[in-house]
Amino acid sequence: MSEERPNQFHPTPEQLALVEVRRLKKLAKMEKAKQEEEERSRILPREWLSIQPPAPDGVSVKIMSWNLLAQCLIRRELFPTSGDCLKAAQREHMLFREILSHKADICCLQEVDRTERLFPVLEDAGYNFVYAAGPRKRHGCLVAFHKDVFSTVRERTIFYDDQEVREAYDKLNTHGSSFRTRNICSLVALQRAGRADTGVIVATTHLFWHPGYIYERARQAGILLREAAKFRHELGKDHWPCVIAGASLLDFNFTPEDPVYSLLIGDSLLPEQRARLAPSRVVHVTIDPSVPVTTDKMMGDDVLIDEEEGAETDPDRIITNAREAREEDGLLDDVELTKLFNDTGHVFSAYDRGLRSSEGVEELTYGSRVAMQPSRSGGYEPLWTSYTHYWKTVLDYIFVLEPVDRPVLVTGLAKPIFTADLEPGLPQKGKCGSDHISLCAELSWPEPQPTPSS
């Protein structure tokens, strides 16, 4: 027989009721916080398009690419319909949610700043990452990869300003550059977990933004393609695909009608594309300091940053502070520029190829609003990849340089978004935290065949 302890506490019914009230208040507070976080991070849902089955007994990789719109580049007057969504504290919840919502094996991100906020989110979600930025740039490019799926073999940063595009002869400038832009490309070789001979080369970049500098953008894209293929070959991984994004995945800052798109894909340059390239062959004061300054601003570092990163400042600016190129400047002509791309090989666009073979998506493609020759690539890029109050266009792509010995299949895509859902312009609370629309593709290719033993 047990004896009751004289000091044992027995709560009264009133005390028990008070504990229950406190518990319910705590639960209500937690639920409210959850709902507030849900509202802060709410974004447009993305439907997934299944294109075709993966390669039998092959490798499948889901890759997303997105330009985050660096906080340091935001100018409120350019986004008059975005309201408080332009504030970092408002945008970041949507940015983080969208990055993770794709459940991608690899994420290629451009215009990445505020890394002290982003990096912990990626780490908590199980990603490792490689971040790179150009000299004195306030934002950079990032390749994140799920640590349970991939590991880093090697990484390399390409500084476009330092790359040569021609042999040294006739005293021509071997760099052939028109503007020191400080743009970079980040190359990362990723090996599949548990498969030493299986992997992917990932390149992400942010090409020079200025609308007038078509030649410089083409030069950078040609270098990107050349260096990605060179990187793969040096590693002895020619049987690995190269994904070029961003921005690989690319933020390329050109449309499907642009000469740069045709050069990358392997379409011949049209007369009108050659005509657009010609006036962009100039030499900026950053290359030739003797060029007269044609603006009333001093050319200090701050002004150079404005001019080089000014896509968010004034996207319609004409070329200033530059002169016509001379022969000794070494800029490539159309034949030499084409050769720069042809010597490496050509890429395909995951969206252009995937949507082209899908049914019922024509109204969500670039070709539904811009007339394109059926024989040329680009008409099946997404309807929009950047949509704001002032500019609405396609600038972002996921390009693939296939292995030398096997094809790459596009097995799925994040479905493009209807125009009505993007009004009145991005960024927009409850829709998207960036002025760009994220891309995501699932790729598949056959496993390499084992080498027979002698």
Image: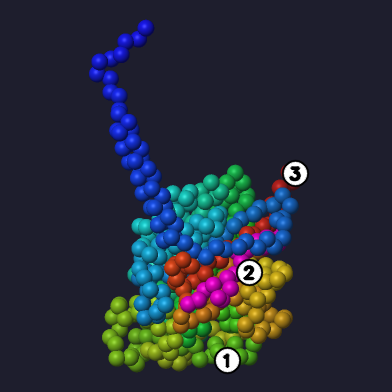
Looking at the image, which residue sits at the far left? 7
Residue at image point 38% right, 73% down: 83
> Residue 156, position in %: x, y?
48, 61
N-terminal of the pair, mark 1 or mark 3, is: 1
Q: Is residue 187 something one can see in this rendering?
A: no
| Mark 1 or 3: the one toward you | 1
User: Helix, strand or loop at disc 2?
Assistant: helix
Q: How is the image coloured?
A: rainbow
As drawn, 130 above or below 370: above
Work out how far the residue at label 3 is from the one at label 2, CA to CA, in angstroms. Answer: 43 Å
Q: Are marks 2 and 1 in contact (CB under 8 Å)?
A: no
N-terminal of the pair, mark 3 or mark 2, is: 2
User: Helix, strand or loop at disc 3?
Assistant: loop
**Is 364 on the left-hand or right-hand side of 181?**
right
Residue at image point 69% right, 84% down: 373
Q: Label 3 belongs to which residue?
A: 454
**Is 351 on the left-hand or right-hand side of 315?**
right
Q: Which mark is residue 275?
A: 1
**Is 48 on the left-hand or right-hand side of 39?**
right
Q: Which mark is residue 25?
A: none
How packed is label 3: few (under 14 Cα within 10 Å), some, or many (20 or more)?
few
Work out how far the residue at label 2 is from the one at label 1, CA to CA, in angstroms. Answer: 28 Å
As drawn, 214 above or below 159: below
Q: Label 2 belongs to which residue?
A: 351
> Residue 451, position in %: x, y?
72, 48
How packed is label 2: few (under 14 Cα within 10 Å), some, or many (20 or more)?
many
Q: Which residues are magenta?
A: 406-424
> Residue 261, position in %: x, y?
59, 78
Residue at image point 70% right, 71% down: 360
Question: Disc 3 residue type?
Answer: Ser
